[in-house]
Image (cartoon, rainbow, N blue to C red):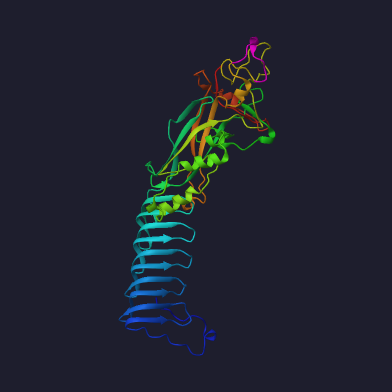
Amino acid sequence: MAATGEGSPASLPQRLDQPRRPPRNGYGVYVYPNSFFRYEGEWKEGKKHGQGFLVDRDGQEYRGSFHDNKRHGRGQMLFKNGDKYEGDWVQDRRQGHGVLRCADGSTYEGQWHSDVFSGLGSLAHYSGVIYHGLWINGHPVEQASRMVILGPELLEVAQGAPFTLHVQLQQQHGDLAKGESGRVLRISAGIRYVQLPAYSEVSFFKVDEDHQETPMQTPFGFQCISYPVSTPTLRGLEPEAAKETAGADLPLLEEDQVDTPSGLAARGRQSQCLGDHQRQVEQGYAEFRDLLLGPPPPGRQPFLFLHSPHKKDGSKPRGSLCPSGVMPTAQEPTGGSRPEETSAELAAEAYPGEYVIMIHDVTTPPFLGRPLPTAFKHLRVLAKGTGQRPRVPEEGTRAFSQRQAPWTHSRTPAP
């Protein structure tokens, strides 16, 4: 760590002060002129050896043990970027066990080798995410690489019935990433999107021109557009009660956990107020309880029956999207009898058909700079009391022109 003079001869004094010769043994101070470099501490045979305090040419400070002119043993280092390290050193490198407190608020505690995280360690990221597990060359080995919504490939639920989703963070080879906690996940929903010609008999609802949106691609071979999904927080809890409910699921901290990286991060998460439709991962797992698809949003007018322009007068309309025995909201029930469910009840529920559930990693900032890919689940809503599966329109009805108004469609029960 010897320093040399810098600058042109014209910029230097006529005479340079020679540095003080370091003592061969014992305690002494060594300061190099025109430089931050300074050492105060113990010497042995002219080399830094024992306990000492060093300020290098970058202004970084080290206080701890030296051996043969190098940082070696236990020591503390303040880096020029504001990071602080306390732990073991071997030949001027961090090696052994140590704690790094970064200027951005992240904290790592665990094993080091050759100046990088290596071995078993815990990182409490400033986003609130905690990773506890194996590190190799500064990279987490058991980090999550994807999210998976558990359950059957096609999830079927009855119309108006709530459902629960279980989400896992998985490693590259499919193992549960149980060493990760704290990621924030958000749920959203979509409805299958199909543009149908104006003469089609079957459609789910029509989208007003002012409310059109770009369809999203799904891994199921079709596109979808957004659709509302509600959670218990949105279905009646007051804001304060919702906050209390959100905090009720967080684990209590033991006194001996407060000063650990995991304890510090968990304490930070307790004060974090999650938004609607959001859940936090605990040991690679998250749960969305009692989800419910709502009615079609404004600007998307439901059509329970669409008449073909070629249909003969008096013939029975086809393509009913409502449950058996329920007529369209714009028509009176046949035979003077009222349907089993009122129009208001129907309007408060999602219609039978095909939907998509999406889970997004919205951790802010992204953990280690990369959010997990969105997870999808194919959802089918079945009509009440029918036990019938929605049917798919014939492929011929999917042809469309760019000039025609877009229609959204979800597979519907056979009449």
The main secondary structure of the magenta stretch is loop
Question: Any magenta on residue 7?
Answer: no
Q: Is residue 137 visible?
A: no
Q: Residue at x 43, y 64 (%)?
A: 84
Question: Any magenta on residue 332?
Answer: yes
Quarter residue 321 falls in: top right
The foreground one among 310 and 20 is 20
Q: Residue at x 54, y 39 (%)?
A: 241
36 is higher (above) or lower (below) than 382 = below
Q: Residue pushed farthest top?
A: 335
The foreground one among 137 and 395 is 137
Q: Is residue 259 left or right of residue 14?
A: left
The foreground one among 309 and 411 is 411
Residue 324 x/y as whole percent: 56, 16
- Name the quarter where the C terminus is drawn: top right
243 is higher (above) or lower (below) than 82 = above
Residue 243 x/y as whole percent: 53, 42
Region rendered in magenta: 329-339
Q: Is residue 157 left or right of residue 46?
A: right
Residue 13 x/y as whole percent: 52, 87
Q: Is residue 104 left or right of residue 348?
A: left
Quarter residue 87 falls in: bottom left
Q: Residue at x 45, y 67 (%)?
A: 79
